[in-house]
Image: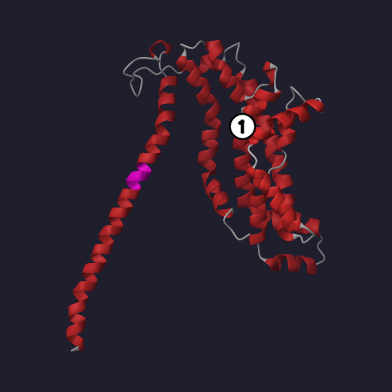
């Protein structure tokens, strides 16, 4: 009787597994189709912008547009770079200088604050950290007028320090690194304290070298945000030689003419190419940084 039952249920089990396998593969195929569709939607504007930047300026508004031009006009890029009215290398240096300084400052200040909130015990630590995180709920546009008044009172208008000083730290960076510090084993701190290490030595020589993924992710986020900052330079900068890439790109159309769409898009491609390469090389760290925020807190 037991043999009969086992023989009868075996085909049912195999049939059930086969059905589950079919539905699982169908779900994976639909998921891949969805991801491919989203990728096409995301890539299409950049592809069109790149192809248009290689067209003859006279044909940039042709209808219907060709996805890829028959003749590649790389001289559009040379025209933008060598233009006497648009000092692209100056804008590149301004953006790079500000982004590097802001990134280095945030890595230092946020890692120190994250270490304090994550590992040190002091009165009101959790309350202070909660208030610190509450600043993330304040829209950036609300702080524009107070920031403008403070920068003007410090006589920093039309200087790059007006963009650097307000960005030397961030609540998101502190939260990101605090989460990573709290995930490290407690035994490391106990062993360091037994060896006579102080708080600063524990932070600098023991814990900080272990936060490479979090520091890399924060550095990438900060660099991209600083490079793409448009409102800050628009609000605080006035002189042409102080402008960064986003402001220069916004004004490039007036110098090249509204009908010269190919050279305008060539300038935009020059500005985003470093970020595109940077993102492709560092996307693994970006994913890890997003995962770190979900660690225990």
The residue where tag 1 is placed is 227
**From where the camera sits, is residue 178 visible?**
yes
Measuring from the top left, give residue 296's x and y in whole percent: 61, 61
Q: In this view, does 41 lie to the left or right of 121?
A: left
Residue 198 lies, with reference to residue 237, above or below; the image says below
Measuring from the top left, give residue 168's x and y in whole percent: 72, 39
**From where the camera sits, is residue 205 visible?**
no
Helix, strand or loop under label 1? helix
Task: Give the residue at x 73% y 31%.
Answer: 146
Residue 197 lies, with reference to residue 211, above or below; the image says below
Residue 73 lies, with reference to residue 180, above or below; the image says above
- Which is nearer the eye, 61 or 194? 61
Quarter holding the C terminus is: bottom right
Task: Give the residue at x 38% y 44%.
Answer: 35
Residue 118 occupies quadrant: bottom right
Give neighbour class at mark 1: few <14, some 14-19, many 20+ (Cα, 10 Å). many
- Span colored in magenta: 32-36
Measuring from the top left, give residue 181's x and y in whole percent: 67, 57
Residue 15 lies, with reference to residue 74, above or below; the image says below
Q: In this view, does 275 lie to the left or right of 204?
A: left
Task: Give the residue at x 73% y 35%.
Answer: 166
- Which is nearer the eye, 150 or 186? 150
In the rendered image, residue 35 lying in the magenta stretch gets the answer yes
Quarter holding the N terminus is: bottom left
Q: Which residue lies furthest to the bottom in this view?
A: 1
Count of numbered marks: 1
Measuring from the top left, give residue 51's x and y in whole percent: 40, 23
Residue 228 occupies quadrant: top right
Q: Is the magenta stretch mostly helix, strand or loop?
A: helix
In the rendered image, residue 244 lying in the magenta stretch gets the answer no
- Coloration of the structure image: secondary structure
């Amino acid at each position: 009787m037991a043999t009969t039952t086992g023989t009868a249920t075996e085909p049912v089990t195999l049939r059930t597994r086969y059905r589950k396998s079919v539905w699982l593969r169908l779900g994976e195929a639909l998921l891949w189709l969805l991801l491919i569709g989203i990728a096409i939607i995301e890539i299409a504007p950049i592809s069109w912008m790149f192809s248009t930047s290689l067209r003859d300026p006279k044909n940039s508004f042709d209808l219907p547009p060709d996805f890829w031009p028959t003749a590649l006009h790389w001289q559009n890029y040379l025209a933008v770079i060598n233009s006497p009215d648009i000092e692209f290398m100056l804008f590149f240096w301004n953006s790079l200088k500000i982004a590097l300084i802001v990134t280095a400052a945030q890595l230092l200040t946020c890692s120190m604050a994250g270490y304090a909130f994550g590992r040190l015990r002091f009165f009101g630590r959790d309350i202070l950290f909660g208030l610190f995180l509450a600043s993330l709920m304040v829209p950036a546009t609300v702080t524009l007028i107070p920031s403008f008044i403070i920068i003007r009172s410090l006589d920093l208008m039309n200087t790059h320090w007006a963009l650097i000083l307000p960005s030397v730290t961030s609540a998101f960076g502190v939260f990101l690194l605090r989460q990573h510090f709290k995930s490290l084993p407690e035994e490391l701190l106990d062993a360091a304290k037994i060896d006579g290490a102080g708080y600063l030595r524990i932070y600098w020589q023991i814990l900080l070298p272990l936060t490479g993924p979090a520091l890399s992710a924060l550095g990438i986020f900060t660099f991209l945000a600083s490079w793409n900052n448009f409102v800050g330079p628009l609000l605080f900068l006035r002189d042409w030689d102080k402008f960064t890439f986003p402001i220069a790109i916004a004004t490039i159309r007036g110098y090249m003419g509204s009908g010269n769409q190919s050279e305008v898009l060539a300038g935009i491609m020059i500005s985003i190419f470093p970020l595109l390469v940077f993102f492709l090389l560092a996307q693994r760290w970006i994913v890890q940084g997003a995962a770190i925020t979900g660690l225990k807190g």
